[in-house]
Image: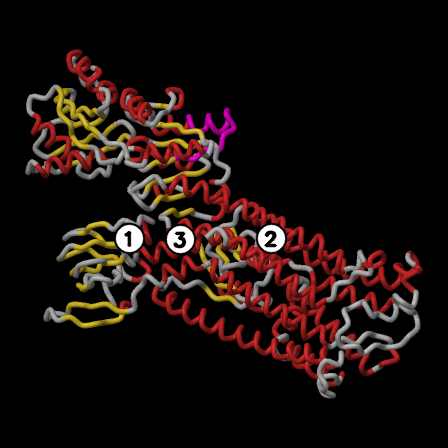
Amino acid sequence: MKSIQIYISGMKCGGCVQTVERIINNSEGTKNVTVNLLTESAYFDIKNNKLDIKEILDNLSSNGFPSKIYTNDFSEKINKAELDKKQKWIDKWKKLNFAFILLFISVLGHLAEGGYIKSSLLGNIYFHASIATTALLFPGRPIIIKGFKSFLLNRPDMDTLVALGVTSAYLTSLISLIFPESGFPCFFNEPVMLLGFILLGRFLEDRAKYQTGSSINELLDLQPEKTLIYDKNENIKEIRVSTLSPNDEIKILAGDRVPADCIVLEGNSLIDVSHITGESKPIEVNEGDNLLNGSLNLNSSLRLKVIKVGSDTSLAKLVNLIESVQSQKPSIQRLADQIAGKFTYFVLLTSISSFIFWWQIAFRLWPSLTKAENIGLSIHNNHSLHSSLGSNADNPLTLAIQLSIAVLVVACPCALGLATPTVITVASGKAAKKGILFKGGDKIEIASKIDSIIFDKTGTLTKGSPYIVGYVGSKDETFLLQIAASLESDSRHPLAKSLIEEAKRQNLNLFPIKNIKTETGRGISGKLSSIDGEIKVGNLQWLECHNVAISHEIKNKINSSEMQKYTIIGVSISTNFIGCILFGDTLRDDALSTIEKLRKEKLDIYIFSGDRKESVVDLGRKLNCKINDLKWELLPEEKLKNIEKLKSHNKQRVAMVGDGINDAPALAASNLGIAVGSGTQIAKANADLVLMGNKLNGLDYAFKLSKKAIKKIKHNLYWAFGYNLIAIPLAAGVLYPKFGILLSPSIAALLMAISSITVVINALTLK
């Protein structure tokens, strides 16, 4: 294992994220730690073999964050997702209902005291003291315990602020009730209302957070529970999908989903693969075709052979990839988490400062506040149940206590912690549904800043399925094809595929390969059984560099105007030239429309290709590209140099779109590497963004989505910072001396909940 993912409970804000990151970073053998508040997970790489995962899990749990290692068992993950979802909602719903029953009783007490309801019990202060005690002991107990535990461990978080606010209000009221001569205010309704609003806010917040992560749950729902299997006697029976093994033969009916990665043995049908490629148009499959896990069979029964099951299937790997994407933070989120980590200290300091200010300083600055209509200095207690904190304060100490409590409750590091991951999760899930896979939230941020896009030609702008147009300079075209196809039989280059398919069509027997050597971007050389001498297949310049003589007549013919649009390879045995093969390729149907859309987004378009000048210029003309934006006959290292030139000299942020092995270095060197789904595995491995389908039109969508996502993140951060910038001074009583405006902690709690929910809902508008 090179990396580990763990699930973590108990995180409520950016301060929690910072604490968890610090604990894991301080553990032996970890590096590149990222923690995601939204998905409640941590993701880190293994630095050395001294890593003790159990010690990390125990350390997190002892600090109030119960954790367990991520499971890669796909069937277990599906079951866990469903059970967790049900259990979480049941627990939260019970706590919320309990808190609201208490809140309802508290409101009735307000009405009874105001004379709207005649009830000696509802208006009794001791009855409300018991309601507040019940609220703290039951629905509020987990928050209070965790909050004080975090405080004692010197890592205050959102729960700490709530716990201090609730218990301060409760204890102040209790002292007032027991010792009336203390002059302390009595407001037992405040802890009840405060907890009610906080639990409501968290319930709605969790509900919205669940919706932001729905893309993974929707993918998990594509896995069927049961399927039909053939036994040894060719009888069909129904079994659970979790019991399937490779090489089992199964039957899927019209309307069934494919339970594993399979190959078609019998039948033909239309298949919906939109969950992988994002393309709504069904594909037709026949005997010998591969089917991906989760695909939907539309119209005919099929007999399939199981190839991969469980965690090895394409669906499981897609889920794993999206999970890992959501764990990778963009730099803008790291900054927000760092601020949120320090935020609770700032709030605690502000609360203490408010207390000291209103107790010792305020009344010296504003003597008018001591008037009877504002605050009398005489000591007497007020057992009003429904007064806002501070509005009926009897003395400076009373007012100071109440306003310091309001500051604790109104502050919201939750909004800061959720501002970025909610958007990243929604954006990555939305992109995945369109067949676009960002390999990390940081890649979404990079995509939003791209200035220029470089396209490879063959297999990227063209369909990558070249066909043989003809031959030049050969006395035996069949032998020429046979030699070239034999040497290319182990290659995955698009031209190799065309050679092999044409050889099969002509029923040619291929010669076994003795040895082979590839020079990327130039050609391939090696020896074949039954053929004397080294064989070379590649571009003509490369052949000439190896002393292969090509006549002027052939060169003139190849360089003629009618040949310019073809890709040409030469074949030689030893130093003897035996002929050229001409290939044609067709432009992708959506290439021109995609590039025009990208130009409208003010992105500069370049084409870098290893093909001949004439072929590249002809393609550029079709795509309305300027000659200065085209590069041809480039080797992989030359593509690299040109990319570095754009990045360094022109100060451009560059995306590279490619599909082949020779594109891998360029993909890695660019700011954003983009691989086409039909390309090679090495190209996909080096890419930051993968277009899973066989079309380019997802590019425009990906760049637009990334820009919208980053704009949403900025909106969220502006809101989170702005809310706290206004709410904290308001709670601290900044408007009280002049306007008499004070903020009740229960209203403060409601505002805090609204701020978090607003951030999450704003992220959901991306959908």
Q: Is residue 552 magenta?
A: no
- Is 240 on the left-hand or right-hand side of 474? right
| Amino acid type for the residue under numbered disc 2 | Asp
Percent across and percent down for residue 101 are 61, 79
- Is 463 on the left-hand or right-hand side of 412? left
Q: Which quadrant of the structure image shows residue 633?
A: top left
Q: Distance between the residues labelled 3 and 1?
A: 18 Å
Given residues 546 and 641, the one toward you in this image is: 641
Figure label count: 3
Q: Mark 3 points at which residue?
A: 321
Q: How crowded is mark 2: few (under 14 residues within 10 Å), some or many (20 or more)?
A: many
Given residues 44 and 330, the one toward you in this image is: 330
Q: Give the range drawn in magenta.
A: 642-656
Q: Residue most toward the bottom?
A: 120
Residue at 20% from the left image edge and 39% from the top image edge: 490
Q: Mark 2 points at which residue?
A: 337
Q: Name the residue under label 1.
A: 273
At mark 2, the secondary structure is: helix
- Quadrant housing the N terminus: bottom left
Q: Which quadrant of the structure image shows residue 369?
A: bottom right
Q: In this view, does 147 lie above or below 278?
A: below
Percent across and percent down for residue 58 are 54, 67
Q: Distance between the residues labelled 3 and 2?
A: 23 Å
Q: Earlier in the sequence, mark 3 or mark 2?
A: 3
